[in-house]
Image (cartoon, rainbow, N blue to C red):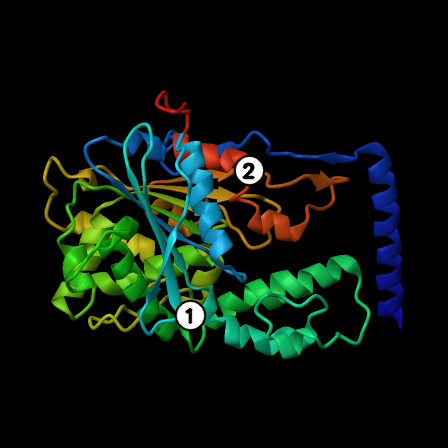
Amino acid sequence: MRLVSRSRSFAARVALALVMAGALAGCSTPYKSPAFASSSGNTRFEGIVDLLEPQRPLDLLFVHGMCTHDELWATGAVTNIYAALGGTEKVELQPVEVEDTGIRLYQQTLSTPRGPIRANAILWSPLTAPLKARLCYDQTDKSKACPPAEAEKAYPYQRAQLNRILKDTILNDCLSDAVIYQGQSRDQINERMQRAVLQAVATSGGQRSDGNAAVAAAAMDESIPLVVVSESLGSKVVFDALFKLSVSSVPAKRAAGQRTFDRTTLVFMGANQVPILALGDTMLDGTIKSLSTDGSSYPRDALAELVASRKARAPFKAASVAAAPLRVVAFTDPNDLLSYILVPSPWGKSYDVVDVVVSNDNTYFGLVELPTTAHQGYRENSTVRRLVACGNPTSGKCQ
């Protein structure tokens, strides 16, 4: 009873604080102008526009994160960056199934004033939809993952509006993806993502590839840069897949994974979750099991392992874009419950990373930003789009 009284008292104080803060502060956007931090002390980074050249394409790989996504995500993700690069063609991505995986690719080659881009968006959301559907019974507003029969059933109890948003979306439709990935389905998802990455690289932008995808990816010209734009859990998923490819016992896959990562020049990550997800690969004493030589285990940070392996390999040819150090740019809204800055973390020293702290929405009364927008608003954030396209400071090549 005493605990209930204290809870009610706390709720009353919060309500009073909201009223008082509303009268005094209204709403604000604390990081409308972004803040920067870097593990190297240098917060400058190139944008995609700086890598464009008229005589050769640039490959873009988009990977979404947790929460249910569909083809609208793919179109929006490509369109936003393409428009920021000054592109004027109509974005009409061609859907292609990655056979026997449940994953779909969306691809298109597009021209920009500075050179062509080959866009590839990997939609892996259907993989987890059947499992997430098992939580639909506890949703007030049913998600897109819910089958029609379950969507018609009403949740029988009353929930406060903010709690409903948090339960329906952040937990049932979003965090559930992370739980699934870190659990029994991880190997299955990883194997299918490996195939999706290979197909995306081998047929980048929708080009034809009549041979084996791994062989084609391994033979890709290393002077063609690859830029990865990933979100939330997607950063973990895609680099786990590249890591597994790079240590595969199958020579063609191993060569394809290494060549693909060697071509990776820039990585833009929104809503980074490596620090919390790494806990799932860590024992209580803070150590991890030694990585197996057969590639059956996972590192805490696959990107760090890929960078270390890349440095250990033979020096690159002078003409290779891979001769330049990889730059990682991580966007974080401090009010995003599912995102972590990297520079102060144990992984901030593993590779050259720049934290970009931005606000995806208003903070109301100094107390709250809508959690769904805080986590899912990076794509629609004009500041984020501009930085991905034009770098920091803004490139003179941007229109």
Q: Secondary structure at mark 2?
A: loop
Q: Residues within 10 Å of mark 1 (few under 14, many from 20)?
A: few
Between 83 and 345, the residue placed more toward the observer is: 83
Mark 1 vs mark 2, CA separation in Å: 33 Å
From the viewer's perspective, tell me whether residue 194 is left or right of residue 310.
Answer: right
Q: Position of residue 159 (x, y in %)?
A: 79, 66
Q: Quadrant of residue 397?
A: top left
Label 2 near label 1: C-beta < 8 Å? no
Instruction: Tell me what residue is drawn at x 16 percent, y 57 percent.
Output: 216
Q: Position of residue 224 (x, y in %)?
A: 20, 42
State the mark number for residue 40.
none
Q: Is residue 147 above or below residue 348?
A: below
Which quadrant is the N terminus positioned in?
bottom right
The amino acid sitting under disc 2 is Val
Q: Which residue is denoted by mark 1 in the rendering?
A: 283
Q: Which residue is denoted by mark 2 in the rendering?
A: 358
Q: Position of residue 326 (x, y in %)?
A: 28, 42
